[in-house]
């Protein structure tokens, strides 16, 4: 049990101001309420009506002191004999005889027989002091329980002396430096029948039980605690098979560490909707929805995924038996039975009406402590409404959520509601829940189809899309829904839409192929045309070249012919030389 | 420190019962001393020569407190004759001591 250090003292941090030293009780929840335990070295009073658990609380204080803190203890019983006490607490696993043998515990029964006590003058309780002192010294006790000292009032007529002796006793206990628990029976108008709270005033814890609607709830309240902050509410407490556990209604701490690790819900597309990776480890997931929307299947899938990862899971079922769940989930492809055999999965199937809310809470917490799972399912929490009133259920669930978060357990709660969003139980815990999934049925085209949406999911960019929730023979799957002119399409309408889209796609593909073929043909025709043009061009170029070369030889031939004609006509060669700028007409033409 | 005070004379035959008384005290406190003195005086008066008184100092033998379920100091326990009787206080209220120890039959 984590001991909450006093936040007040931490803030002050003045070195000369030592915080009131405390003895942790080790009792589940009580150390949170008292912020660390009972005042060390001082007597505390635990009072309440008959049968409220005073003796047990006191005994557990001693036993936890021995087991968890190594502090020996003395139990002085005025009412029960040692053997009775040993037998009574054996049912909670406290082996007093063993502690006695180990020299850690003295159980001393002081028998007070009223008729034996004829008072014949001045007396004092020195014998009792000596007796206590001897017991304390025998084991070096740090903790002392005196249960119930008011029995003495039945034995002595001289109550004035008795009172002053009791006052002296408590001062003496204080001087001995033992942390003492004094129990007292509640009286009319006073906390204890004989008003001993007057003498034990450092810390007073009042126990009580309240019966509402045939359900008994034990409650604990710290009436006063000198020198310390403490929770002031009435906290329900239980006497379970492991002793007392006090349940602080409002989490005093809200200090649970958080994990950034994400875990899969077992439905890949749901993980995608939850920020792509699923919920955070240690967070709480609420699945609410109407009947038959597959909440349990989703929860089972979550378990299945956890077990497949080698993690442990507990499935608390309030409606179905283990075999029924295993059979039903087998039909959608989950073999939960195999996980049970491997010891990874436990089912706890109880009717909510079997016992009270507090007992449910305690039983669940005990199971969780024992099995240490990483995933817990509560299916469905709405059933608990039948056991308690809204406020009780809400406080119980709050504590359950806090408890599981504190342990880093990822929890999935399912909640059954009728049509319409926001069911009574949902409202109770919606604000505590980290991820809220909403499953509902959509009616259309003569069909009921399931749809899932994420209403909230803290700390992640979650999807705003509605998905169709399909329960297939491979478990839960999510599919896109189509939003068209007719609204959201699910079921066969969605299938039709998908077929339509598929055929559209085929058509588009064919179209594309056609166009590609056309283009190719176009290209070929262009290439052909280009080839023709090239050919024409080359022909033209040939012709031009031919013409060009022919033109040059024509001029040479012409000059020679002219020289030849000139010779023949005996013309003046100078004329030729001048004209050709050279003596040799051959050179001129070159 | 437990000691007995023998009284010697044992020839009385009309009251055959022998009284064994145990006085629990805690050290030599004034109350203890007064109680012891009162007890001896009463015994001498009402039980001459047929009583013995054992004084148990719980400071020395604290474990003996549990045996006779001693809570208050001083306490006188009538061990014999049976049944066991227990009275507390410094024995200054003689009438109550006589009733408590049944030294004087209440019928008279």
Image (cartoon, coloured by chain):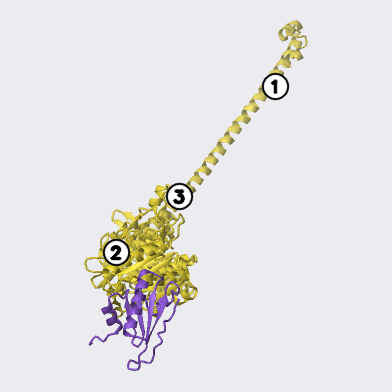
Chain colours: A yellow, B purple
As drawn, the label of residue A197 is: 2
Q: Which residue sits at x=76%, y=15%?
A: A586
Which residue was labeled with disc 1? A553
Residue A484 in the image: above or below residue A109: above
Q: Nearer the viewer, residue A460 or A181?
A: A181
Select label 2 or label 3 by which is in front: 2
Question: Sequence-wise, which precedes: disc 2 or disc 3?
Answer: 2
Query: Is residue B106 visible from the viewing direction of this image?
Result: yes
Q: Nearer the viewer, residue A140 or A21?
A: A140
Judging from the image, mark 2 belongs to the subunit labelled: A
Which residue was labeled with disc 3? A512
Select label 2 or label 1 by which is in front: 2
Q: Nearer the viewer, residue A107 or A137?
A: A137
Residue B40: give x, y in percent of width and height: 36, 79
The secondary element bearing badge 3 is classed as helix
Query: Dot 2, crowdedness within 10 Å: few (<14), some or many (≥20)?
Result: many
């Amino acid at each position: 049990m984590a001991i909450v250090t006093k936040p007040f003292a931490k803030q002050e941090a003045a070195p000369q101001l030592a915080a009131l030293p405390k003895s942790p009780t080790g009792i589940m929840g009580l150390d949170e309420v008292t912020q660390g335990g009972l005042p060390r070295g001082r007597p505390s009073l635990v009072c309440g009506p008959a049968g409220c658990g005073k003796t047990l609380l006191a005994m557990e204080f001693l036993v936890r002191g021995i087991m968890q803190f190594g502090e020996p203890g003395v139990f002085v019983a005025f009412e029960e004999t040692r053997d009775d006490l040993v037998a009574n607490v054996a049912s909670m696993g406290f082996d007093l005889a063993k502690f006695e043998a180990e020299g850690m515990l003295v159980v001393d029964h002081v028998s007070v027989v009223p008729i034996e006590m004829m008072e014949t003058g001045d007396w004092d309780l020195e014998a009792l002091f000596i007796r206590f002192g001897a017991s304390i010294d025998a084991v070096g006790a740090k903790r002392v329980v005196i249960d119930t000292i008011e029995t003495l009032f039945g034995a002595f007529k001289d109550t004035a002396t008795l009172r002053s002796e009791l006052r002296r006793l408590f001062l003496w206990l204080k001087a001995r430096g033992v942390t003492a628990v004094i129990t007292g029976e509640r009286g009319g108008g006073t906390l204890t029948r004989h008003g001993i709270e007057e003498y034990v005033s450092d810390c007073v814890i009042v126990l009580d039980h309240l019966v509402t609607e045939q359900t008994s709830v034990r409650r604990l309240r710290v009436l006063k605690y000198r020198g310390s902050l403490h929770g002031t509410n009435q906290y329900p407490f239980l006497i379970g098979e492991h002793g007392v556990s006090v349940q602080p209604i409002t989490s005093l701490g809200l200090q649970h560490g958080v994990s950034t690790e994400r875990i899969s819900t077992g439905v890949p597309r749901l993980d995608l909707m939850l920020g792509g990776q699923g919920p955070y480890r240690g967070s709480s997931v609420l699945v609410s929805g109407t009947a038959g929307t597959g909440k349990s299947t989703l929860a089972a899938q979550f378990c299945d995924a956890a077990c497949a990862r080698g993690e442990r899971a507990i499935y608390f079922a309030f409606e179905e038996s283990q075999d029924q769940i295993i059979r039903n989930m087998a039909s959608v492809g989950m073999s939960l039975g195999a996980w049970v055999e491997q010891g990874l999965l436990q089912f706890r199937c109880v009717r909510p009406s079997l016992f009270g809310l507090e007992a449910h809470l305690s039983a669940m917490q005990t199971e969780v402590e024992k099995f240490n799972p990483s995933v817990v399912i509560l299916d469905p929490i709405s059933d608990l409404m039948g056991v308690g009133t809204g406020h009780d259920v809400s406080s119980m669930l709050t504590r359950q959520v806090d408890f599981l978060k504190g342990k880093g357990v990822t929890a999935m709660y399912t909640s059954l509601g009728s049509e319409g969003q926001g069911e009574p139980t949902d409202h109770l815990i919606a604000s505590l829940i980290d991820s809220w999934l909403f499953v509902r049925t959509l009616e259309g085209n003569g069909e009921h189809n399931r749809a899932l949406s994420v209403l909230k999911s803290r700390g992640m960019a979650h999807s705003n899309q509605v998905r169709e929730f399909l329960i297939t023979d491979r478990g839960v799957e999510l599919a896109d829904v189509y939003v068209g002119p007719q609204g959201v399409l699910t079921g066969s309408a969605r299938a039709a839409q998908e077929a339509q889209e598929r055929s559209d796609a085929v058509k588009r593909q064919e179209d594309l192929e056609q166009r590609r073929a056309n283009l190719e043909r176009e290209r070929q025709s262009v290439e052909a045309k280009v080839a023709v043009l090239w050919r024409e061009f080359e022909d033209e170029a040939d012709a031009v070249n031919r013409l060009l070369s022919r033109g040059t030889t024509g001029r040479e031939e012409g000059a020679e012919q002219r020289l030849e004609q000139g010779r023949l006509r005996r013309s003046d060669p100078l004329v030729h030389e001048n004209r050709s700028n050279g003596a040799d007409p051959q050179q001129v033409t070159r | 420190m437990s000691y007995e005070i023998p009284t010697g004379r044992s020839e009385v035959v009309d009251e055959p019962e022998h009284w064994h008384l145990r006085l629990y005290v805690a050290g030599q406190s004034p109350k203890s001393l007064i109680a012891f003195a009162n007890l001896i005086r009463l015994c001498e008066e009402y039980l001459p020569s047929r009583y013995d008184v054992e004084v148990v100092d719980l400071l020395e033998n604290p474990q003996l407190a549990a045996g006779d379920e001693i809570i208050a100091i001083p306490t006188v326990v009538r061990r014999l004759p049976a049944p066991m009787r227990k009275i507390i206080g410094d024995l200054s209220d003689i009438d109550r001591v006589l009733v408590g120890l049944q030294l004087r039959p209440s019928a008279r």
